[in-house]
Image: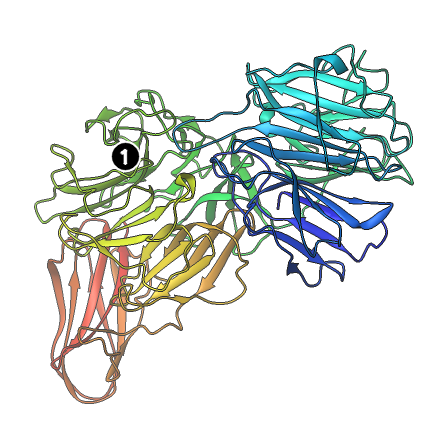
Amino acid sequence: MGSMEIDPNNSNIIYAGTGEANSATDCYPGYGMLKSTDKGDTWNVIGLSEVLNFGAIKVHPLNSNIVYAAGMGYRSKSVNKGIYKSTNAGATWTKVLFVSDSTSGMDVSIDNSDINIVYAAMWQRIRPPSVSSTGGLTSGLYRSSNGGQNWTLLGATNGLPAPSATTGRISINVGKGNSSFVYSIYKTTTGNNISGVYKSTNKGLNWTSLATIPPSSGFDWYFGLIETDPINVNILYVGSVDVYKTTNNGAAWINLTNAYSGSFDQQHPDQHVLWINPLNTQSMINGNDGGIFTTSNGGTNWSKKYDLPISQYYAACIDFINPLKKYGGTQDNGSHGSINAGPAGWEVLYGGDGFHCAVDYTNSNVIYMESQNGGVGRSDDGGNNFNDIATGLDLTRTNWSSPYMLDIQNPSIVYFGSYVLNKSTNKGNNWTVISPDLTKGANGRLGTITCMSNSVLPSTQRVIYTGADDGRVMVTTNSGTNWTEITTGLPVRYVTDVVTDKRNPAIAYVTLSGFNMDLSNTHIFRTTNYGANWVNITSNLLNVPANSLIIDYNKDSTLFVGTDAGVYYTSRLGASWAQLGTGLPNAPVFDLVYHQATAKLIAATHGRSMFELDISNLPSGINNNSEIATEFSLKQNYPNPFNPSTNISFEIKQKSFITLKVFDLTGKVVATLVSGIKAEGSYSVKFNGENLSSGLYFYKLESDNGNNEVKKMILLK
């Protein structure tokens, strides 16, 4: 949501502009304007679906039929930008201000005492994949005195900045207690800081600059908070990394949040909205990148609200030895870890923006976490302490969410992707570059690796696939000695995930997103020959980006995919897809993690926290003829993981010739536990892996008519 507005004359009526209001890299588009007439219990789309993102909504207190909306449009050039007006409570809309196809309607404010006076803040900004533009000559503050029929650009003659190539985001606020008072804040592209705070005492006709400006962040295009006290219009609040207050026209600014001076339980950086109780101005609600905070004493003390599941996860992982322990990296809120299976007990373990995480599958105390642009660290004591292991990495070009992974057979080997692939053989203490540039080269913001996957050949050579933000996909079948581009046959899109079939590394999948390139459709592809050819298996999936893919090794032809509209699965290798489970909010799923032994699927959403689903009730038989095996059932081994022995149980429903074999990741048979005719009944056999190395193994029960069932187990020594 970019903006919400409650009808000042009827609190049952709420308007909501979908699509995020900040021009970030992963700023999500919406699907129009929503309206509720029952306090949010139900909603209807009331138009403006083409606008995609909204910066502000205002309902006029003198006439609730009059509604204004600041239409940002999407990140690229579009005519669907500007200020929109409805005169019939949202039933129909008219664009009343358009500046250019690169200029968004960022903010709109109205004179509460004069139905004809309207203010609009326009922002020149585009953010296609390779560049980021946060300002320009068409950014400016506009005023209308006839309800939006005509507009005047306010500038130097009014006391405001003249049009400039460095003018960035602008915000505006009309005093609620006295609409003659109007405030605006200007940002500049030079350093992306605040360039000035301005005040008018005659309804926007003339302006003066406040004595000083509050501290800036260096990325103030991200903030638009400006608010006046509802009773005393000489009290002004401005948001940046912190919320600042002035009572003397900017002669001094008081930091009300001091986010970096205490714990983030008390306050959090990056301020976006502030609501001041008109009946008690000491009572305020503050919304920032950490959630919702409240104060009852004017900002002296703040309390965080913990009952909102709104974490924006980028990635997740699970402790395969103790699957109750889960981890995830979140936008602006670091990387977290859980100590139990529920929503309670999560702790912040690593700072910054949180991204990829990994747990050593042979030692739960070894945990990897990451902050933005490759700030990877390792803990050797279960997350209590972390050491920086980014030293020695080639970080010349890195993705905001730089991928890394553990080797499939040796967890001391770690791979890290920047624009080249870096390899460590000692858990990140030292690094060596093992590839050329695996992208199409530096191109503005593009040219970084976004995902990777590894498997192993019988020769012990590693097969590694990589995907990049510019659409390039590469593969090596000899541990990085030689690389082959395998992009032919794939759309030029941001590669969100690449997954290798561990049973046969010639088989791989890529998932794609086109939103940052203003493209859609065709999101999942499969290869069976190391990328020489690709087959589109998107089929009936919704036309939204796919972000993460999981192969279910217990079920033939079963895949799970996390998309911007939830989780879907197929049991037919993508011939058709169905939505998986219930209870998952309609939110982008950025990452999927599957704990095969317990049949638990983890979905990390970007905005609605993390969810878990037991998928053991899905069809579990694998049949080479696409039929579910009905003559036997294979149980999950116990214990799992195991060292060195485990028990495997199965049930025979009719007399059959049965084999039970164990395979390593290369498909080599390492043990034959059963081979012969078995009568109807239940059986249990012991498997001893004393002479095998730690790793992932498969065991398959098969009858003489070809029916078979496969499950996975983990040997940890």
Q: Is residue 151 left or right of residue 278?
A: left
| Viewer-closest of 230 and 463 | 230
* Residue 598, visible in the rendered structure: no
Residue receiving disc 1: 415
Crowd around label 1: few <14 · some 14–19 · many ≥20 (10 Å) = many
Q: How many marks?
A: 1
The image position of residue 82, as x and y in percent, is: 61, 37
Q: Residue at x 75, y 50 (%)?
A: 87
Seen from this angle, which residue lies furthest left? Answer: 459
Q: Is residue 579 left or right of residue 188?
A: left
Q: Residue at x 19, y 49 (%)?
A: 693
Q: Quadrant of residue 206?
A: top right
| Viewer-closest of 11 and 449 | 11
The residue tagged with tag 1: helix, strand or loop? strand
Q: Residue at x 27, y 34 (%)?
A: 415
| Viewer-closest of 160 and 348 | 160
Compared with 395, 468 (above or below) is: below
Q: Quadrant of residue 186?
A: top right
Q: Is residue 677 left or right of residue 375?
A: left
Compared with 300, 43 (above or below) is: below
Q: Residue at x 34, y 23 (%)?
A: 395
Compared with 241, 548 (above or below) is: below
**Which amino acid lies under the numbered mark 1 shown in the image of this protein?**
Tyr
Q: Quadrant of residue 198?
A: top right
The image position of residue 121, as x and y in percent, is: 67, 29
The image position of residue 23, as x and y in percent, is: 54, 33
The image position of residue 461, as x and y in percent, is: 12, 41
| Viewer-closest of 68 and 289 | 68
* Residue 88, visible in the rendered structure: yes
